[in-house]
Image: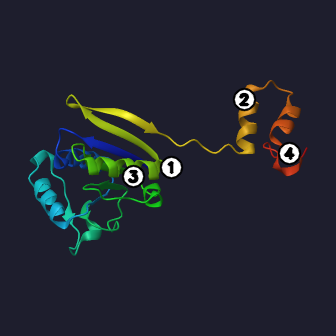
Amino acid sequence: MAQVLFYHLTRSPVALTAGVLLGKALAAGWRVALRGTDRDGLERLDARLWLGPDAGFLPHGLEGGPFDGDQPILLGLGAITNGAQGLMLVDGAAVEAAEAGALERVWVLFDGSDEGAVSAARAQWKVLTGAGVAAQYWSEADGHWEKKADSTPTPALTPALAASSLRQILPRGAPSCLRACTGLGQGPDRPDGDAA
């Protein structure tokens, strides 16, 4: 199941935070698409990522080349074309809940000193969590990252799940309560598969 991590940047530049997170994603064996909203901004980020330390080399490319599909990290403006398991969003780029749900991880990096970026991130949070996507909100505080919010979707309570939960807390021999409380127990829809 996908998880969206929002990073409210107040001290670190996008390139530095992106570099750290991209390195961790590659170490986990994931491919990543990094989506922006401005080609010039992506070109600047591309140049900064190439200047990283030798030990932290991040193999990547800018969308539009002949080997886009082979890039472990692909910077672009549109759809994922490199088979990525993760998507990083910068400069107000957005993701739909269905797209986020199909990925392992989505990172939303936004500038905490830009009120427009903060508002866009809040709106994105509401859309994604409202659609049942798990999300966490991280903020830079005093030079370290602090989790400020966590939204984990709760599974829908179905009659079978209710019956299963009741079986765990009720004493044996309380099947009449299961039937009365859940409507289960008549015929083939009984959780244990036996006909009543």
Of the image marks 3 and 1, the number of the one nearer the N terminus: 3
- Which residue is disc 3 drawn over? 124
- Real-space CA distance between mark 1 and mark 2, rounded to the nearest whole angstrom: 30 Å
- Between the C-alphas of marks 2 and 4, the distance is 18 Å
Give the residue type at disc 2. Answer: Gln
Q: Secondary structure at mark 4?
A: loop
Mark 3–mark 1 distance (CA, rounded to whole Å): 10 Å
Q: Disc count in the image? A: 4
In the image, which disc is placed on residue 168?
A: 2
Q: Marks 1 and 4: in contact by CB < 8 Å? A: no
Residue 117 vs residue 103, the one in the foreground: 117
Q: Indicate left or right for 141 with 174 as reference.
A: left
Counting residues from the start of the chain, the first of labels 1 and 2 encountered is 1
Q: Which mark is residue 130?
A: 1
Determine which of the numbered discs, if any, sits on residue 194 in the image.
4
Q: In terms of sequence position, does the residue under pointer 2 or pointer 4 come before the other?
A: 2
Alpha-carbon distance for marks 4 and 1?
38 Å
